[in-house]
Image (cartoon, rainbow, N blue to C red):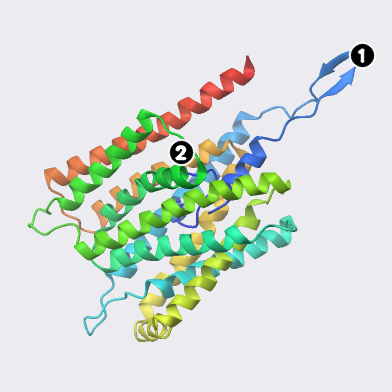
């Protein structure tokens, strides 16, 4: 996942769908803080807590969830538009690493502003930020490359929703995690549904995917698995040294290393100058890319806002269900012609996603019940 804070993909931790590394640690640090007890007249009591205000909570949730949905629904739509763009000479935009430079730069700027106002955490170990930044930016670039090489946006998004498969593998190998049968069944439903959609034909007989596009999305999922394992390692290392980074620490440092890696690779591949030249020749694409990058940074901030005011599970539910609406929005607004087989694949994958959300909610309620006993 979904981790409790976003990956820059949203699609993230959503990125995340999208989705920000390390936020899992941040959320755990929040949720694990214990309320101090005070002693009075020979008895132990909890200090008075603020009285909940349901009306304010509804407004805050509407603001946070609405911001996440608006930012990342538009983000996904813009991403599809960028790689569907065709110039007058028939050429298309394929400089995915150049795109990652600009997206990461926008997140670094917003992250730096967040650190300025909230204060930065000192002595944060940088090793895993470097490695995770490299794996995350690779994941995002490979997703973009899958779109640039003909994979349809619905297939790519559903495939990324099944990233729990490589994440589970990565955490089993690198993080020592364990999972139940339901976890495996949920992942199987998402993967199988995505496969049915990708192998199916449109009404006109054309496939929703290409072999090269599928290759890149598999590479992206592999990078998600590496990132998932690294996150668990980072969490353990942070706990050992007693450091609790703030959300914008993660946003700034992760995206800084993502940007550095993207700059290096884009120069090596020649994409940096090619990307600038293409955008100069196609001014309308500049507008799409700038809005795409801004939506990524704003979306991350809305995720942080939501996690700060609610249980991380609420944010995870919002970012997970957002992917379903991104797929449906793409199908209905971008001219994707779906066959019955394609709709069956979408339905199966969506059922796996919703089961994952339900499982998280049920697990959270059980934990709360145990604590209250």
Q: Position of residue 101 (x, y in %)?
A: 48, 72
Residue 77 picture quarter: bottom left
Relative vertical location of residue 173 with respect to residue 82 in this rendering, above or below: above
- Can residue 161 be spotted in the picture? yes
Residue at 31 percent across and 69 percent down: it is 83
Residue 130 numbered tag: none
Please say if the residues under marks 2 and 1 sit with CB atoms less than 8 Å apart: no
> What is the CA distance from the residue labelled 2 to the residue labelled 1?
44 Å
Q: Which residue has dot 1 on it?
A: 41
Residue 317 numbered tag: 2
Left or right of residue 115, residue 266 in this image? left
Q: Mark 2 or mark 1: which comes first in sequence? A: 1
Q: Position of residue 142 (x, y in %)?
A: 36, 64
Residue at 34 percent across and 60 percent down: it is 219
**Could you say whether the residue bearing mark 1 is in a helix, strand or loop?**
loop
Q: Which image quarter holds the N terminus?
A: top left
- Can residue 17 be spotted in the picture? no
Q: Position of residue 164 (x, y in %)?
A: 39, 44
Residue at 29 percent across and 48 percent down: it is 328
């Amino acid at each position: 996942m979904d981790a409790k804070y976003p990956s820059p993909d949203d699609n993230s931790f959503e990125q995340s769908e999208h989705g920000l590394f390390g936020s899992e640690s941040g959320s755990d640090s929040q949720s694990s803080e214990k309320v101090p007890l005070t002693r009075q007249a020979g008895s132990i009591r909890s200090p008075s807590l603020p009285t909940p205000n349901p009306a304010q909570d509804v407004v805050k949730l509407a603001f946070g969830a609405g911001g996440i949905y608006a930012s990342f629904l538009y983000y996904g739509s813009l991403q599809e538009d960028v790689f569907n763009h065709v110039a007058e000479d028939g050429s298309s935009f394929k400089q995915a690493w150049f795109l990652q430079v600009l997206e990461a730069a926008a997140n670094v700027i917003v992250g730096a502003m967040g650190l300025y106002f909230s204060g930065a955490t000192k002595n944060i170990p940088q090793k895993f930020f470097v490695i995770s930044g490299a794996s995350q930016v690779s994941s995002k670039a490979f997703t973009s490359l899958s779109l640039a090489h003909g994979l349809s946006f619905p297939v790519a998004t559903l495939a990324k929703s099944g990233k729990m498969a490589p994440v589970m593998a990565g955490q089993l190998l690198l993080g020592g995690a364990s999972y139940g049968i339901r976890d495996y069944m949920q992942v199987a439903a998402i993967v199988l549904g995505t496969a049915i959609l990708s192998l199916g034909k449109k009404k006109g007989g054309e496939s929703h995917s290409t072999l090269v596009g599928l290759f890149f999305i598999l590479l992206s999922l592999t990078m998600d698995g590496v990132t998932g394992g690294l996150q668990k390692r980072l969490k353990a290392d942070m706990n050992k040294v007693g450091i609790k980074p703030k959300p914008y620490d993660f946003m700034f440092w992760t995206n800084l290393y993502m940007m550095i890696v993207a700059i290096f690779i884009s120069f090596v591949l020649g994409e940096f100058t090619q990307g600038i030249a293409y955008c100069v020749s196609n001014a309308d694409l500049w507008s799409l890319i700038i809005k795409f990058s801004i939506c990524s940074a704003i979306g991350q901030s809305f995720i942080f806002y939501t996690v700060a005011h609610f249980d991380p599970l609420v944010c995870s539910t919002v970012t997970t269900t957002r992917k379903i609406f991104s797929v449906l929005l793409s199908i209905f607004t971008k001219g994707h012609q779906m066959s019955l087989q394609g709709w069956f694949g979408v339905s199966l994958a969506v059922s796996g996603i919703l089961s994952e959300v339900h499982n998280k909610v049920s697990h959270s309620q059980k934990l709360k019940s145990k604590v209250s006993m």
